[in-house]
Amino acid sequence: MKKKILVTGGTGYIGSHTAVELQNAGYEVVIVDNLSNSSADVVDGIERITGKRPTFEQADCTDYAAMERLFAKHKGIAAIIHFAASKAVGESVHKPLLYYRNNLVSLLNLLELMPKHGTEHFVFSSSCTVYGQPDQLPVTEAAPRKPAESPYGNTKQICEDIIADTVKSGAPIKAILLRYFNPTGAHPSAEIGELPLGVPQNLVPFVTQTAAGIRPKLSVFGSDYSTPDGSCVRDYIHVVDLAKAHVVACQRMLEGKSKKAVETFNLGTGRGVSVLEIVRTFEKVTGVKLPYEVVGRRAGDIEQIWADPTFANAELGWYAKETLEATLASAWKWQQRLA
Ligand code: UD1
């Protein structure tokens, strides 16, 4: 029988791509999302790509009673992939309580409900933000976590700790923490992609909106960093590669192949790319001239970070396969579909 996977935040950017890959791998998908930062139309996109409509429940993971009803209705959830969370760094500085409530209470509810309903496997959306500015690059999972720069980053660290403490206490739960680098691009079909609300904070949506004429120009935040061209360096990973890693993580737990009750993996390409390289590559791939201006540094930005994905490659047999060119081309195709 097909195993049932609950995807919280499943109409969101990474969640929707993961729902597609789970269905393609034969899993039955139940999505729960409060639609605070996404649309129910995304379910149609998932259906158009896979030929199968995932079950969709509109509910808020911070609502314990609603989640209890969801577990009772959808019996036999084998694993949960928990994406549902607030993720805007700047907003978290102004509304810390919103971030702590949303991101922590959701997690607490799920971890409390899992043993009651016999769900043993948990995949958590974490972030490379937990490393701060690493002392050594590329960064491995063994690198120490640095004090968080924002309430958002702090919620990721606290959530990782809550999961570890819960498992350590003897709860019948196994978990995999996935630390994402910079998820980018969209499904090649352009049926689903990132839907930023308002002015995008992340680089690539800002780039594609600028290229589409929605924004007059891109501001490149800083050119005086100690990097080869002076702009910040990140590890941009195609969202479809990232989504596939979640399928592998679920499979690993469901097949009893985890080596520890809580395992942590970096999900990145292993390649550092600068902001100016993104601009140049985007222009090359799309043939569109991108107006940009170098401005001052953005507060709170780290200079450079990219993943050492060796552990995920070796243990999960998973690799980020897409090129930066294909990733940016998919982001542009999606933007054109939106525009
Ligand atoms: C940011 C968050 C990170 C979070 C992630 C979620 C910060 C400091 N970090 O990552 O904690 O997990 O989003 O998506 O906010 N840039 C420009 N112009 C722009 C936008 C971005 O030059 O208009 C630059 C930034 O300075 C940075 C790079 O592009 O060097 C990537 O920025 P962004 O997409 O916001 O991602 P991160 O900062 O890596």
Image (cartoon, rainbow, N blue to C red):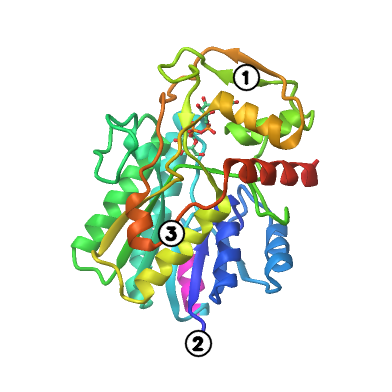
Q: Quadrant of residue 290?
A: top right
- On screen, residue 316 versus residue 71, left or right, reads left
Marking on residue 318: 3
Report crowding for label 3: few under 14, some 14 to 19, many 20 or more residues within 10 A (C-alpha): many
Mark 1 highlights which residue? 219
Residue 1, numbered label: 2
Q: Which residue is more in the foreground, 85 or 49?
A: 49
Of labels 2 and 1, earlier in sequence is: 2
Q: CA distance from mark 2 to mark 1?
A: 51 Å
Density class for disc 1 (Cα within 10 Å; few <14, some 14-19, many ≥20) is some
The residue mark sitting in front, 3 or 1, is: 3
Q: Residue at x 56, y 50 (%)?
A: 322
Seen from the viewer's position, the closer of residues 199 and 27 is 27
Q: Is residue 135 above or below residue 10?
A: above
Q: Indicate left or right for 138 with 172 as reference.
A: right
Disc number at residue 195? none
Q: Are marks 2 and 3 in contact (CB under 8 Å)?
A: no
Of circles 2 and 3, the one toward us is 3
Mark 2, residues whose alpha carbon is within 10 Å: few (<14), some, or many (≥20)?
A: few
Quarter of the image holding residue 30? Answer: bottom right
Residue positioned most to the bottom: 1
Residue 59 vs 68, above or below: the answer is above
Query: On the rendered structure, is 3 left or right of 186?
Result: left
Residue 289: give x, y in percent of width and height: 75, 25
Label 1 beta carbon less than 8 Å to ligand 1: yes
Residue located farthest toward the left when viewing the structure as drawn: 169
Q: Residue 220, percent across and down?
A: 58, 20
Residue stretch rendered in magenta on the structure: 66-72
Q: Is mark 2 within 8 Å of ligand 1?
A: no
User: Label 3 to label 1, Cα distance in Å?
Assistant: 34 Å
